[in-house]
Image: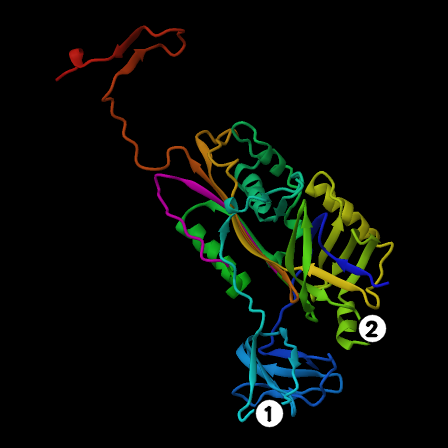
Amino acid sequence: MKKTTYVGGYIFVFFLSVLLVLPVFGGTTGKIKGVVVDKKTGEPLPVAHVIIEGTTIGAATNLDGEYYIFNTPPGTYTVKASMLGYILVKKVNVKVLIDMTTTINFEMERDLLPPLRPRVFAVDTVEEIEPEEIESTELKWTVITPHMEESIVPGKNLIYCSTFQLAWNMLQDEIIKDKVLLEGDPDMARLLNKQLSTKNDISKDCYVAMAGEITEEFLEQLNKTLREKFGDQAPTEVVSEINPEMPQILSYAYLYKNLKFEHQFEHLKEPICFKSEDAVTKIRAFGIDEYSAYNREHKALSKQISIIDYIDDDNFIIELMSESENDEIILAKIKPEPTLLQTIQTVSKKVLEKNNISSIKQDETLRIPRLDFNIRHSFDELIGKEVKNKGWDGWYIEKAVQWTRFKLNEKGALLKSEAKIVVAAANGGEPREFVFDKPFLIYLKQKNGKYPYFAMWVDNPGLLLK
């Protein structure tokens, strides 16, 4: 019986365990590969010609209908497939990236009535468009949390990234030098003070965490560090207005991870019917449509999949292996525990035990939802709260924001996240004016006395010098 394994329903738990460094990629070209088949029969078409339009770069298919175009310069191309007796097919907007493999498959129809001029079917490929940044307030069914002890609520997504915790840790360890005490003792601050996640959970090459008074020198050093470590992947330059009369402290963190699959998974035509509460939604997916041990591509992909645990089609855990040997990509379709932390701990225990590891088998299917978002979130629970630590009278949390960019598809997992916490002195803002131009109180009192020896409430100008 065919076993269909897809990640959907119950809860979708995804987390990265970042340990050491990312591999360095030094290539300058990419690769195009794919399969050419008869659209009606599905049979492979050998000796079909696949060429990048306007160039001499191309390849012929083998007996299995497969082709490989190596050493392709990065860029956006139109790729065409042709074969005697078949209608020419073009695919436009084919993007080739450095050190990446772009998979382009062709289905060709027989040309039963050859026309006077070539007939061309142009098919758009799946084009990846950078998602616009959106405010979390627009996402009614998504919760952004700065810590892992947030409760899991049925029907709601829950997103955690460690950058805000890293920024909080810097504020706590380098600036306050104690647990951060805030007005009203909010639960969020109390949980962040526990520092469940630290720098030790992430390799040094993939994050920057700094804190200090906002000065030109501090901002210059921060931006220099980001450029040196991340190059083109560095975030937009960190800027802030500097006012000597308004001291501010910035606690900052940035994280970048790009976990590429050595072999690109299939972009599946059949969507996932994702079930949440009483709703069913069709979702774009990647994976393996139907595993065949006789398919060389599938055999290569199977080495990137590890079945950690399987109880039934609604209770399983898998690991996807990227080119980074020191990172894990874990996906678990399970019934959740009350909190995100407890759910992660339950899954992590089975991952560490690895008692029932197996591989994908003949005719089994792997379907994983594609994710691609860019979210900005403000932790309003903290903003405006006064710092109650000794020596910090008059300081308060002015800003507490986090950006999270995440993508998961057939090529791999990409994560970029930035967090900023700004602590400001209460005398900040516009220059103050101390003008007694309305009724006021004045009294004279000895410091050790209980009551003043002179007091006056001034309510009219009768006794004031004109």
Vertically, is 93 above or below 119?
Answer: above
Disc assigned to residue 114? 1
Disc assigned to residue 124? none
Q: Which range is magenta?
A: 235-257
From the image, which quarter does the C terminus lie in? top left
How much space separates mark 2 and mark 1, taking CA atoms? 38 Å
Coordinates of residue 270 in the picture (x, y in percent): 68, 65
Coordinates of residue 88 in the picture (x, y in percent): 59, 86
Magenta segment includes 436: no
Which amino acid, mark 2? Ala
Q: Residues within 10 Å of mark 1 (few under 14, many from 20)?
A: few
Secondary structure under the numbered disc 2 in the rendered image: loop
Residue drawn at point x = 50 percent, y = 61 percent: 227
Secondary structure under the numbered disc 1 in the rendered image: loop
Please tell me which residue lies in front, 192 or 344: 344
18 on left or right of 236: right
Sequence-wise, which precedes: disc 2 or disc 1? 1
From the image, which quarter does the N terminus lie in? bottom right
Residue drawn at point x = 54 percent, y = 27 percent: 184
Disc assigned to residue 293? 2
